Amino acid sequence: MKWLLALMLLLTGCTVSTSDYKQTEPKFDLFGYFEGNITAWGMLQDYKGKQTRRFTVDIVGTIENNTLTLTEDFVFDDGETQQRIWVINKLPDGRYSGKADDVIGEAQGVESGNALQWQYTLAIPVDDSVYNIKFNDWMYRQDDKHVFNIATMTKFGFEVGKVTLFFRKDK
């Protein structure tokens, strides 16, 4: 039993925290980066790392007061299209909350340095079922034009896949 406790403590101590990025540049600035037109492309991988889908996304971000609205138009490699509209609020403590039609509850985000961690549960339809999958997104700002995103997807605490996404801000 002691070895199990030691293993749990070891694994807990190995997690990444937003504070690890506090001194990194450029600052993430969620609203500043995502205002305007963004082009993105990425892929989904299953739990084994096998690529299962590729996609592109055209994003338009608009800001009104403390609210960022992101309209995301997805085109997948099999021709399927999807649209997600995020409504993201900047909270007084520097954190963010967001909603979209296929998000269960509310997404929560925090930025630190060049990183943003964004967590939410997404309702994903597959055939005649809908699966609620937890997403743990880590976004990293590279420069004025580029952001990288790696999202880990879990169900019942087990990793079921990853999303890798690259953003390019259109000037």
Image (cartoon, rainbow, N blue to C red):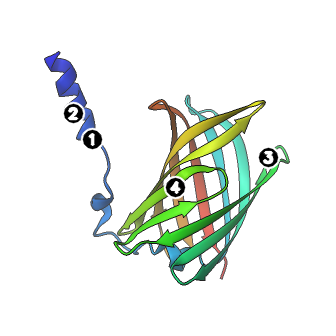
| Res 116 visible | no
- Residue 75 screen position, x and y as percent: 79, 54
Q: CA distance from mark 4 to mark 3?
A: 29 Å
Tell me which label, 1 or 3, sits earlier in the chain: 1
Distance in Å between CA atoms under marks 4 and 2: 30 Å
Q: Mark 4 Cα within 10 Å, few/some/many (few <14, many 20+)? A: some
x and y percentages locating residue 89 in the rendered image: 51, 71
Q: Is disc 2 in contact with disc 3, using a CB cutoff of under 8 Å?
A: no
The N terminus sits in image quarter: top left
Q: Residue at x 21, y 20 (%)?
A: 4
Read off the residue under disc 1.
14
Residue bearing mark 2: 10
Residue holding disc 3? 77
Residue flagged by tag 1: what amino acid is it? Answer: Cys
The disc, 4 or 2, on the residue closer to the chain's N-terminal end is 2
| Mark pair 1, 3: CA separation | 36 Å
How far is disc 4 from disc 1 in space, using C-alphas? 27 Å
Which of the labelled discs sits on residue 106, or is there none?
Answer: 4
Say which amino acid is labelled 2: Leu
Residue at x 73%, y 51% (from the top left corner) = 55
Mark 3 neighbour density, 10 Å: few (under 14) some (14–19) many (20 or more): few
Callouts 2 and 1 close, C-beta under 8 Å: yes
Q: Are marks 4 and 3 in contact (CB under 8 Å)?
A: no
